[in-house]
């Protein structure tokens, strides 16, 4: 077993599994959807295999919130609550988002478990995912009822939603790389000093909780999502 | 080849079904599949009734909604006609919903419709329905010639049928089936404006290319910026470690990685 000295637990195992389900289903959906948009890839859509793969991805994608609630109810709740709750530090942080984007975390307003950018990211993902799922289900099960105009508008909303999610994915990968955050999703742990630099209020909370609770309960006490 | 077209003279159609049968056998269509359907139409109220046959088939629109929504290029325009390559079809069914005439059908999970007897015509023959039509209600040839013939026939029809007119010269950018309509086309269940909906153009003409372009551009910009920002961040971490930048709660010189390195 690896020791996690000078590290803090950021994502529990079940959260990492749920994230893996989201990531794999999303990438499958992106690829099997992209073959319908981009001419050079359209040969992959021939014969219709990409259609049922898209539906497999869709089922995986729709199971993400279910899997999160079932495997880690508290984590799911915290994600939902935190993503839509902003304090004054978050507003200030957002004003200086350019600094943070360019790799400067010091002197940014102190952030909780999620920084304001992550909150906005999650909130947008939740809302846009709802729109992509609804339009996707409409085109999957109610295509004849939509008619030519309905189908086209559903596809427009579906495509624009995916555009938003794909741009958010680019940003997600960007910040993961810039702040070398990948270990949060592989081992679940991140460097304590870097966590303090980027999520000072969160690390304070963890330490308070650790002082209050007996040792060795880190897995359960660390905050989440 | 120049723009070709069918002539469909509804004033001459006797509803014999010969075209339906010839199309099925000539194109070796499976049971349950047909590219032409003869629909008997009755108008008026008893005892003053008028009847005729609608030759329901692909009208080969120039601005074809099916072509514009087809993601794989299985549907495409050639020689003024709308071809279908089932080998390339993905089975999405967008053409079925988008066609203003409700023509394409899904057969064995793939789109199915008249392709103007592409193979036969390219080998120098005529479409099967045209070859077999006993009343010369169907003709095939250069679109300009077909249009001229249709106008001649309508002029001749007007004595007995004052509402007779040519249908398909302008609809949906001009049809590849020029119809001699003995009555008001709407009476014959032929829409006067079968153009694809605006939304279909927004979808495939604007949203799709813009989405691809924006995604590609963002990925490139993010890729370049990521290298710069990562360098900035690593430098920031080194300066914190060296005590040049003070961050509450972080003791300089205690980082494991720098000790090991």
Image (cartoon, grey):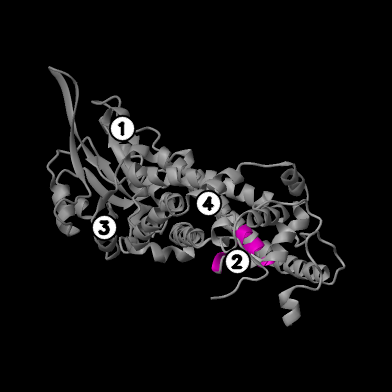
Q: Compute the Cα span from label 4 to label 3.
A: 61 Å
Q: Compute the Cα span from label 1 to label 4.
A: 78 Å
Q: Compute the Cα span from label 4 to label 2.
A: 16 Å
Say which residue appears at 26% left-offset and 45% top-offset.
B57
SS for dot 2: strand
SS for dot 3: loop
On the image, numbered disc 2 is attached to which residue?
A189
Classify residue B153 by image quadrant: top left
Same subunit: marks 2 and 3: no
Classify residue B12 by image quadrant: top left
- Look at the image and give the residue range highlighted in magenta: A170-186
The quadrant of the rendering that contains the C terminus of chain B is bottom right
Q: Position of residue A203 (x, y in %)?
A: 69, 57
The quadrant of the rendering that contains the N terminus of chain B is bottom left
Answer whether residue B3 is visible to the viewer in this image.
Answer: no
On the image, numbered disc 1 is attached to which residue?
B155
On the image, numbered disc 4 is attached to which residue?
A75
Q: Position of residue A207 (x, y in %)?
A: 68, 57
Say which residue appears at 26% left-offset and 57% top-offset.
B117
Q: Is residue B215 above or below residue A157?
A: below
């Amino acid at each position: 077993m690896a020791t996690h000295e000078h590290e803090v637990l950021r994502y529990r195992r079940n959260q990492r599994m749920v994230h893996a389900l989201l990531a794999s289903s999303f990438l499958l959906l992106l690829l099997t959807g992209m073959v319908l948009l981009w001419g050079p890839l359209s040969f992959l859509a021939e014969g219709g295999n990409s259609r049922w793969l898209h539906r497999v991805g869709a089922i995986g994608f729709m199971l993400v919130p279910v899997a999160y609630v079932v495997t880690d109810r508290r984590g799911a709740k915290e994600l939902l609550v935190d993503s839509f709750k902003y304090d004054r530090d978050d507003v200030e942080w957002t004003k200086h988002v350019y600094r943070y984007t360019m790799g400067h975390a010091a002197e940014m307003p102190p952030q909780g478990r999620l920084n304001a950018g992550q909150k906005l990211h999650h909130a947008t993902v939740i809302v846009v995912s709802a729109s992509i799922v609804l339009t996707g289900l409409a085109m999957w099960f109610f295509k004849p009822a939509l008619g030519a105009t309905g189908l086209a508008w559903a596809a427009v909303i579906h495509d624009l939603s995916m555009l938003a999610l794909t741009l958010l994915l680019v940003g997600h990968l960007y910040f993961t790389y810039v702040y070398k955050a990948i270990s949060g999703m592989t081992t679940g742990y991140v460097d304590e000093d870097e966590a303090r630099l980027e999520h000072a209020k969160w690390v304070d909370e963890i330490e308070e909780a650790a002082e209050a609770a007996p040792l060795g309960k880190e897995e359960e006490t660390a905050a989440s999502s | 080849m120049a723009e070709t077209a069918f002539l469909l003279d509804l004033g001459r159609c006797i509803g014999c079904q010969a075209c339906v049968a010839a199309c099925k056998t000539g194109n070796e269509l499976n049971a349950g599949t047909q590219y032409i359907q003869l629909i008997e139409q009755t108008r008026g109220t008893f005892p003053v009734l008028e009847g005729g046959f609608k030759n329901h088939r692909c009208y080969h629109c120039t601005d074809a909604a099916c072509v514009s929504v087809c993601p794989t290029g299985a549907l495409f325009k050639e020689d003024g006609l709308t071809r279908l390559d089932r080998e390339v079809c993905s089975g999405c069914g967008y053409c079925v919903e988008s066609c203003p005439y409700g023509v394409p059908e899904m057969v064995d999970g793939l789109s199915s419709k008249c392709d103007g007897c592409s193979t036969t015509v390219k080998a120098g023959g005529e479409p099967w329905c045209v070859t077999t039509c006993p009343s010369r209600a169907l003709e095939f040839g250069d679109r300009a010639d077909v249009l001229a013939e249709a106008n001649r026939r309508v002029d001749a029809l007007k004595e007995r049928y004052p509402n007779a007119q040519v249908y398909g010269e302008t609809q949906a950018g001009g049809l590849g089936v020029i119809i001699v309509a003995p009555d008001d086309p709407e009476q014959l269940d032929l829409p006067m404006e079968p153009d694809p909906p605006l939304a279909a153009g927004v979808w495939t003409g604007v949203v799709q290319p813009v989405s691809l372009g924006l995604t590609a551009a963002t990925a490139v910009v993010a890729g370049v910026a990521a290298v710069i920002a990562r360098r900035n961040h690593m430098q920031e971490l080194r300066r914190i470690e060296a005590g040049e930048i003070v961050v509450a709660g972080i003791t300089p010189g205690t980082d494991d990685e720098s000790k090991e390195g």
